[in-house]
Amino acid sequence: MSAPIRQEISEVSGWARIGAVDARYQAVTGAVIEHHLLAWAEMATAVTVIAKLRRAGVDGVSVALEDLTRAAERWVRCLTGAPVSPGDPAVGTSRLADGLRAHDASGIDSALHRELVRLADALDALERGTHPAAAVLEEIISRYGCSRADGGPAAYIAARSDETIPVRRWLAAEELVGEVLTPRELRKAPVRDALVLLGPPARYLVSAWCWLGEATKLGGWMLSAPPARQVHVVTWPGQPRLELTGATLFPVSDPPTVRTVRHASDEDQDDERRSVSDDVWLPPLPVQAYIPVAGAWAADHDPVTASGFRLAGDGVVFYSADATPASQIVTWGVDSVHITKGAPNLIKVGTVVLFRPERSATDDELHRRADGLLVEKYGPGAPAAAHAAKAELKEAYASCGHTDAQLEHMLDLRLRDSAYARHVISRLPDPGYIGPEKQGAYLALRSVLGLPEDTDRSQSNLLRRLRAACRRAGVDIVAELIAILRSTTAWQAELETCGHATVGAGPPLGQLDLRVVVAVDPQPKRIGRSRLGLPLPAPTGASQKGAQ
Amino acid sequence: VPAWLDYLRNVGSLAAIRQVSPPRRLLLGLPTTDLAAAAVAVGAVAGAAYVRVRRPLDIPGSGDVGARVSAFVDAAYRDMKLVAADGSGVKVGWTHFSEYADSVRVLPDGFDERSDRKLKQNHPVRTAWTAMDLNGTNAMRVHARCSAHPVIVVGQRSALAADLADLDAVWPFANAFVDVGFGLDGWFRHPVLVCDDTCEPTDWLCGCQPALVVCDGAAAWRSQLRRALPDVAHILVADRRSRAAVQLVEEIQAGNPTTEPAVPAPPVGIEAWRIGEGALSTLAAYDEGDLF
């Protein structure tokens, strides 16, 4: 192919790409957001009563009523995801009403008699009626139909991954055309005419580990960077509030403009406003969870102060700011996956942590690769020499006869940096720690430990080579892990729904275990070094302190 | 040219032209990061070239004689030994530089050895730089000046390369003009260097200063390389749809940064937040020791 022709093709493909990107910007620039507010008096009553029952549960009610309250919350959520009829047996409206009446008749929690009866009556009324969103959605979706050039549907309908089937079934029953996609699929979807959201964006992402506030921010792009030129947000009682402040990425940005379309009288709207309660969307788990330490965990010969985290799937993990391993935090964008090291104070509820159960096997792999790199660059004797230089420091530390505090003080006198001196001395016993990276600190440490001066820098050069090789090997391993995680996106959906996912990486990297942090222990604990960074079974009798 | 593309180019250009103290930290929230880092890089190189035509760098002195230098000699970038330096210019190998002696750059200690980079007369890079009509000056000398203070893009190499190729449609020669090099080893030879977010800062980096750091995504902003270059402007291009970007903004907010006016004001569809960055995050505590 001649150069001019090749250049012409490149220019054409360049314009096509720029056009596709420009379409996304144009969709944001000219996006019209319509908020359809529906009234539903019976549901408003039900939500108000459920919120009261939930608040009563904090003061103390029977376990049976707690279960009923949770069932009622699930029932509300079921009716917020698709315009299914409340009388549908799959929704379980009558079953819930019967349960409430039976509990009321038992006389337990008699102080809440009025609320129980009111809720049961509201459920009866709901069962006889229809879902008010059905008609509005039908009207909106039918506006678009199959108006795309290729005859495909011009509107997206967003659904949670567990709601796609009911929504598709409803569309088929009503003979409507729309493409039902989850928010994860919508991120990559090309720009179309309309996006229909059944509730605020936060509703699509809220879970036990992604609370309403965070879900509002994470889902805000559906309003501020939607894959459509028109966005219809249809809300009704029972759904969380539509928060526009979370729609933008930065706190200084102006929220998008929304046109409100009311589908009810003013009186109904007052009822609706009173009833919208985010209470039913609060997480079932507490913010903080005190994790009791099993005896064996602290019985290590070398305990360190560590922060504890509860994981989805009922496990716990501890990380220390002063000792390895650091946490491996997984984040992902639209087309990318990243693994970063994270200090314990950066881990919070919703953080995704990566585990490789066979840590020792990975350490072996790291050293094997590092040694290979040293041999390749410096010859067959290089690994032994480098390890000998590393061992020299460790042996001198073990036999110097000083306490850590004395060593810290002596090092601080030479470095004039107490924090760094503490950091170096605390890391010295760690088998993975090679030595201070700064040349001045290394020489000062040798002096403190009573080692001869490294006048020709031969020892520090050996350590520098070892450090570079280990880092290169670590970077290679991380790159391989990222490649594995990038090769599939199923684990992202699993994490959003279950809170944990497993990805097979094959030897030598083994199985990758991804877990979401669901609660943070506010109190640091003394934990053996060997237990750090490992998912441990949750100890029985873990006391939880709610901070909702 | 679409307004968003123009804005991204202007932002890069301004950041490279006007170095302020304390250096800028500009965060851009975009509907998509496609083409964004590339557009900023195009603007930054154009801005840097504009400045470097008129503003020469310091010339190696007599104390540098014998040091390794990078110079554009005989249609190639070569790493050679500085033979002589006096008031009339510098001598590298058999070549005496009386004009543009500042395009001969002393390599920092520990800089790796590398092979020559040949750029023949009809090479696209030379064609593009000559086409810029830089006041009739010797374009490759300006190229050398810009390469001494390159624009660092932290992000995916393949994505940036593909984006630059596509931008040729809007700005002919954009790809050749940016002349992207891969990794820090390309310092002194390319006006733009793209490095992975796992790229480790080298020992010699403290003696060098880039023109601008462009971070393509949240992981790039967290990278050690960005944190190793605190004295220059940093621009983050973040995808509004990205979960990682939302988490990064939360982290930044937790540090209570000061907000400064973003200049120029962004067009509709782009969010801009200029901050004053405080102390480094606690991630820095893990700089030493094992990576894994």
Image: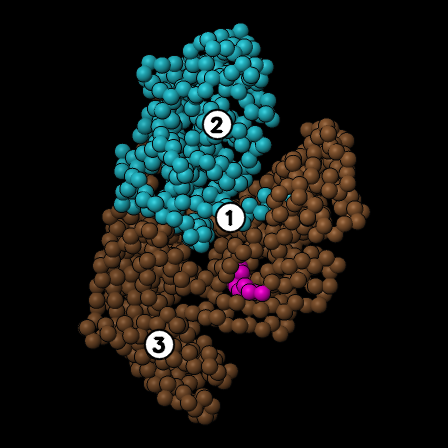
Disc 2: which chain? B
Q: Colour of chain A?
A: brown
Residue B168: % across, % down: 35, 28
**Residue furthest to the left:** A265
Image: magenta residue range: A516-523
Q: Does residue A316 sit above or below A92 in this rendering?
A: above
The kind of residue on which mark 1 rests is Ser
Disc 1: which chain? B
Q: Residue A293 got which mark? A: none
| 2 or 3: mark nearer the eye | 2
Residue placed under numbered mark 1 in the picture: B281
Q: Is residue B53 left or right of residue A311?
A: left
Q: The cyan chain is which one?
A: B
Callout 2: helix, strand or loop?
A: strand
The kind of residue on which mark 2 rests is Gly
Q: How crowded is mark 1: few (under 14 residues within 10 Å), some or many (20 or more)?
A: some
Residue in the foreground of this view, choosing between A464 and A38: A464
Residue placed under numbered mark 2 in the picture: B181
